[in-house]
Image (tube, rainbow, N blue to C red):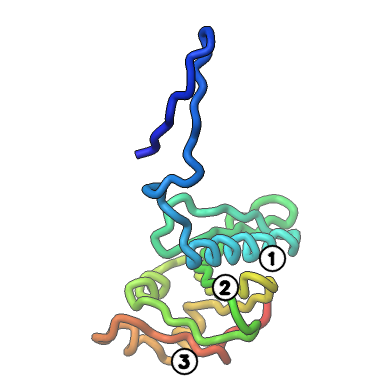
Amino acid sequence: MLAFKALANRGNVLHFKIPNRVSDMPRRTPSQRIGSLGHRVAAARFERLGSWIVRNQEEDVGIDMEAELSDPDPTADFLKCEIKSFEGAAAKRPVRLKNEFLKYACECRVPVVLVLVQAVTGESWFCWLQGCIEANRLRPSIYGSRGFTTIAADWLAPA
């Protein structure tokens, strides 16, 4: 609980001292910081293309962002984006995704795009998940008993 220490009551104004460090405040984890940076980079990539309207998803249940083609008016052609971010060597890398999410992508009637972002440099890669799943015959892995499936780095194209 945030605690304030009353210093003095000067007239009708009450002054408070706020502690330098509040130990029970939640901290932002490095993973949250990297994810947030990557999300902003991915959104900016779409915005720079000029033909997309980017909408952030308020509730993240696997889909992080939605983009609608706008050339120049909105077209009702949408993409759903799953954004994965990392720090470190700026080279594309394999991405491990939960099979529950990949099942959702398989069933989705809207294209779902995986966007991989190096959060510091802004370098990014993408793949159309439904196409990737079909081209690489991943359905047995996704609908099998394992909990995760890996999207190979070679399946990602530069953004």
Q: Which mark is residue 20?
A: none
Mark 3, residues whose alpha carbon is within 10 Å: few (<14), some, or many (≥20)? few
To which quarter of the image does residue 85 belong?
bottom right
Residue drawn at the location 51% of the way across and 22% of the way down: 15
What residue does disc 3 label? 136
CB atoms of marks 1 and 2 within 8 Å: yes
What residue does disc 1 label? 45
The picture places residue 154, in percent across and down from the top left corner, at: 57, 91
Q: Secondary structure at mark 3?
A: loop
CB atoms of marks 3 and 2 within 8 Å: no
Q: Secondary structure at mark 1?
A: helix
The picture places residue 155, in percent across and down from the top left corner, at: 56, 88
Residue drawn at the location 55% of the way across and 58% of the way down: 66
Task: Report the amino acid beneath label 1.
Answer: Arg
Which is nearer the N-term, disc 3 or disc 2? 2
**Relative height, residue 154 to residue 62 (above, below):** below
**Relative height, residue 91 to residue 36 (above, below):** below
Does the rendering let one see residue 111?
no
In the image, 142 versus 124, the foreground residue is: 124
Task: Report the amino acid beneath label 3.
Answer: Asn
